[in-house]
Image (tube, grey):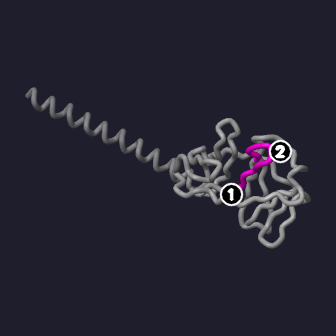
Amino acid sequence: MNDSKNNDSSRRGFLSSGLLLSFVGLAAAAGVCLCSIGACKKKEAKTPVISRHLITIKSGRVSVKVDKVAALDHVGGAAKIVHPELDDRILLIRVNKHGFVAVSNRCTHKGGEVVYNKKEKKLICTNYGHSVFMLSGNVIKGPASRALKTYRLMTIDGNLEVFT
């Protein structure tokens, strides 16, 4: 008789554990589904957009009057180029007095916007901060598995030229 009590307890425990795990699994799946349709709140990037009158696009090159972009007047400053003639959004970052970096502003995981973290000197996806990149575009932490596209830069006549 004692054995049947233990068996009943074991079965109840097993069923309770199974039900709990099923509930957790369903909740997790529902969360994934909600996120995949955009129902989860994503962090909005506050990186300033460079005014179109400071940008010229010609022959595979974007020319930026960088000395007129307030967000880029100091080391660690960042601003983005958003223009209908471009296939990509480009993030410009001032890394030293005369140097800049230009990378795609779209995470390679799900296309979320990336922002520059000045303190850590890293690029972080605004889609929950899951993916983190070096200034070279290389992945530090996924889920992104591919590097961000980087752009060659040159300063000509006081303008920053971004080669697309």
Which segment is the magenta one?
94-104
Instruction: Please determine whether, in this image, residue 61 is positioned above or below residue 11.
Output: below
Instruction: Please determine whether, in this image, residue 134 is positioned above or below residue 120.
Output: below
Q: Secondary structure at mark 2?
A: helix
The residue to which callout 1 is attached is 104
| In magenta stretch: residue 156 | no
Q: Residue furthest left?
A: 1
Amino acid carrying mark 2 in the image: Ala
Q: Please tell me which of labels 2 and 1 falls first in the chain.
A: 2
Q: Residue 137 vs residue 4: left or right?
A: right
Front residue of 80 and 43: 80
Q: Specify the quadrant of the image occupied by residue 57.
A: bottom right
| In magenta stretch: residue 100 | yes
Q: CA distance from mark 2 to mark 1?
A: 18 Å
Q: Residue 156 placed where, x, y %?
A: 85, 60
- Which residue is found at the position 21% from the left and 31% from the top? 9
- Which residue is found at the position 74% from the left and 48% from the top? 93
The residue to which callout 2 is attached is 71
Q: Secondary structure at mark 1?
A: strand
Q: Residue 136 placed where, x, y %?
A: 63, 52
- Which residue is found at the position 21% from the left and 37% from the top? 11
Front residue of 4 and 79: 79
